[in-house]
Image: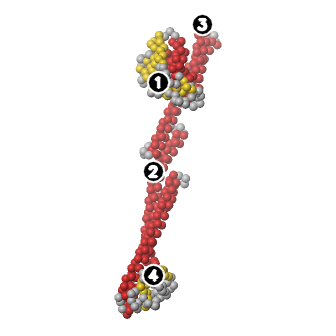
Amino acid sequence: MNTIFYKLGGSIVVLFFIVLLPLGFVMLEIFHNYNHTHLKEETEEMASQYAIMLAASNRLDIDLLVDAMAAETVREIIVFDQTKKVIETSRIESFTPNKNLSGTGEIGSYVDPENNERYFYVGKPVSDESIGSVYVFSPSNLMSSSAIRVQNALLLSGLGALLLAIGFTFIFSRKLTNPLHLMEKAAKKLARGDLEAKVPVTTKDELGFLARSMNDLARELKRYQDSRREFFSNVSHEFRTPLSYIQGYSHALKNGLHQNEDQRQQFIHVIHDEANRMNRLIDDLFELSRMEEERFPLELELVHLGYIAQKAVRKVRPSTGEKAITLVTEIEEDIPDIVGDSFRLEQIFMNLLQNAVRYTEHGSVRVKVLEENGKVKGMVSDTGSGIASKELPYIFERFYRVEKSRARDFGGTGLGLAIVKQLTELQYGTIDVESRHGKGTTFTLCFPEAREGDE
């Protein structure tokens, strides 16, 4: 019973009764009041007419006139003389009129003691010396038959409206609950791991939005599952290679398979490099995991981005080695501060500069810092090999390498740009990339200018 169908149906029926019952009661009261008023006016008019007729008739004709009046209507008539004695009556015998009948007449109610029938009466004076007054009695239930018909009509109308409400509730609730049942089934499939489950979108209302949201959720879960599977596969692959080197060369050293001391030192050097590679990979994975789980502490302060960029360039300059590369810095004057972590901002520039130097054999690596429209931009560009346009959407993904055949020779873990993107967004910034294959690459960092009150 605890379903939307019964809840919605019960609510509509209760609301229906709350509205219909008072409305029906008010309509019946209005009709009863109208009947009472109409009965009063009609009785008063008939009494006035009878008073006029009696004033113009002979006393000998009164009994005939009263009998004719009583025969033509369901009303009762009593004629009194000036002393309040009954001259003629159609049936009522025990009625006693008011002794002081006013010029406008007398109005009241009377219960016949013989049959307990209730009457509404009107008495009018008659302008005749022998006749004092005439009283017309109308049964109070004279209009009851019409009231009963109206009451029955209201009951039938209410019953029909109730059936329509129940039918409407059934149709509407089914239309409402069917998509919810489909969503429930889809949710259970998703919970069991069936991420291909889809909910049909049949409307453009809130239910349609909910169905689309569930489909979007399923797609995101599928994407997350695929990403996680790919991530574990990449992690396994990344660890397998250095482990293979370490295992192979350590086995050679253990069994004395080296030919001379130089080869032995070469084996040791390979083991050392691969161990360092594994250590960097573990550090990057741990750091990236903390960023994504929002457990990454940042020491935010007012920072001059130009100073950070110059500091990173000084550290990277010795790594150019024998390459014909020129490091150029262009820092605008009076650049406003930004809110950031100086150590992490330097890490961002170091990563971008190291990549630029790594993939540039000759030419230049240029660093620019400027202010533009309330934003502070940092740009790192090179004249290296560039990135193909089809590769650009994926370069910030974990373990994605542009030059897959040469990337391992350069010593990268495939996580650098993913970390750069996370660090940038954690400090309220954005990063974009432009590149032409064979022409070079430009990374653009954009941070909001610090406002008054920022610390």
The residue nearer to you, when weighing 182 against 124, is: 124
**Disc nearest the viewer among 4 and 2:** 4
Give the number of the disc on residue 106: 4
253 vs 378, nearest the viewer: 378
Which badge, 1 or 2, is on the more N-terminal residue?
2
Vertical arrangement, residue 84 with respect to residue 175, above or below: below
Q: Which residue is mark 1?
A: 371
- Look at mark 2 in the image and give the residue it sits on: 175
Image coordinates of residue 182 in percent, x first then y, are: 48, 45
Using residue 299 as the reference point, say whether residue 108 is left or right of it.
left
Disc 1 residue crowd, few under 14, some 14–19, many 20+, Cα 10 Å: many
Spatial CA distance of label 4 from label 3 is 140 Å
In the image shown, does 211 or 421 lie closer to the viewer?
Answer: 421
The reply to whether discs 4 and 3 touch (Cβ–Cβ < 8 Å) is no
Q: Position of residue 126 (x, y in %)?
A: 40, 86
Tell me if I can see residue 402 in this picture: no
Query: Callout 3: helix, strand or loop?
Result: helix
Q: Secondary structure at mark 1?
A: strand
- Mark 3 or 1: in front is 1
The amino acid type of the residue labelled 4 equals: Glu
Residue at the location (44% across, 69% down)? 30
| Image disc number at residue 262 | 3
What whole-number distance in Å separates the C-alpha atoms at marks 3 and 1? 54 Å
Assign the N terminus to one quadrant of the image.
bottom right
Label 4 or label 3, whichever comes before in sequence order: 4
Q: Are marks 1 and 4 in contact (CB under 8 Å)?
A: no
Amino acid carrying label 2: it is: Lys
